[in-house]
Image: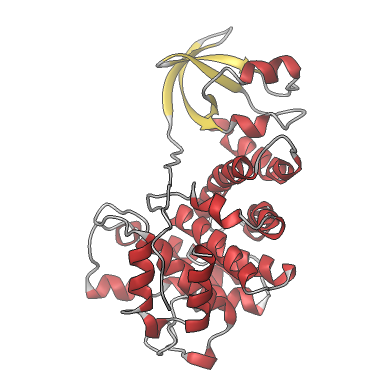
Amino acid sequence: MEIKSGLTLKRRVIKQQKINSIYKDSTEQRRVSFIPINKRVLELADKIDFQIFSADKKTHMSLFLQADSVIDQEKKSKLKHIEKVFTLESQKEKYNNFLEKHIQDILKNSTLSLDEKTDIIYEASTDLTKQLYSNPDSLRNSKLAQNIINPVLETVLHNEDTISSYLKIIEYDYYTHTHSLNVSVYALCLGAELQLKKERLTALGKAALLHDIGKSRIDPKIVNKKGALTDDEYETMKKHPDYGYILAKKYNITDKDILDGIKHHHEKIDGLGYPNHLKKDQLGLFPRVISVCDVFDALTTQRSYKKAMHSYDALMLMKTNMNSHFDNNILNSFIKMLHP
């Protein structure tokens, strides 16, 4: 199958950086940490339960809105002229809960273009996915994963150009949580290309989002190692699909396809994958889809020890040198999706 070289991935880096600053309130001066928040989501709110700050100087913050306040028209107008807004790191959980609730409302905003909607959804989903992967033992993770997937799925179902919009903004640097979000976006778009029904697309998106959750059970020194793993380290890393399966069961996920996608996303059609060396017809649809999306994102993502491959080169490598690893029909559908 011929692979065209017309696709260029224009990705931007989203970093949840901490900013230390002196915040002076009415009673005391104290040093606290701030995190940036998405002001575009704030415009959709009636009431917030966390404080919002703006930077008046490089290392100083001023209170923009107190907690338990309503964002009225005056505040909305002022937000347009503020480049960045922040909240206290200590109020991060409240902000994430707010995001989880209001990310669903972005699709209803008729003033936003598709590119703007996908941009806001992806940025908000990045923060929520980081929360999910930072708290692997939380029993809420199944519901949180569902709430992350829903707005992405809705854009996929109702817009033919969704994949093009997401490709412009998908995170370029590798982190486990951004990689997992990227894989879920690709998987949802690919599942739609394969004409899966909404219920199965939802399950596929959840499996893809949680496919690497088992890495939380692996020593971070191995997961984040710069360079090639030793044989022993690789054997340890190969346990993450089983760990992920156990965590998913802990979240009370009973859907066999979701569990299958998490446990077997590193299996290969030729039987040389892991953990169970399944091949061909032994592999369900979800592992076949996730494996294609997983490898493509890994190849086209930059890490400390390697540069990102161009999408054309990554697809060519997958189509030639790695062809025996994938379901050929699904790989061809993925290529068609990226190069319509």
Q: Where does residue 327 sit, x and y in percent of width and height?
A: 48, 83
Does the rendering let one see residue 210?
no
**Which residue: 50% across, 62% down?**
183
Name the foreground residue: 103 vs 340: 340
Q: Is residue 328 above or below residue 10?
A: below
Residue 18 in sight in this render: yes
Q: Is residue 208 above or below residue 120?
A: below
Name the residue at the top extreme: 26
Q: Residue at x 68, y 52 (%)?
A: 151
Left or right: 313, with 119 as reference point:
left
108 lies left or right of 182? right
**Where is residue 249 drawn, in percent x and y?**
61, 72
Q: Quadrant of residue 284?
A: bottom right
Residue in the image at 64% along x and 57% along y: 149
Examine the rendered structure and indicate whether residue 38 appears above or below residue 314.
Answer: above
Residue at x-position 33% and y-position 72%: 317
User: Is residue 216 or residue 204 the one in the foreground?
Assistant: 204
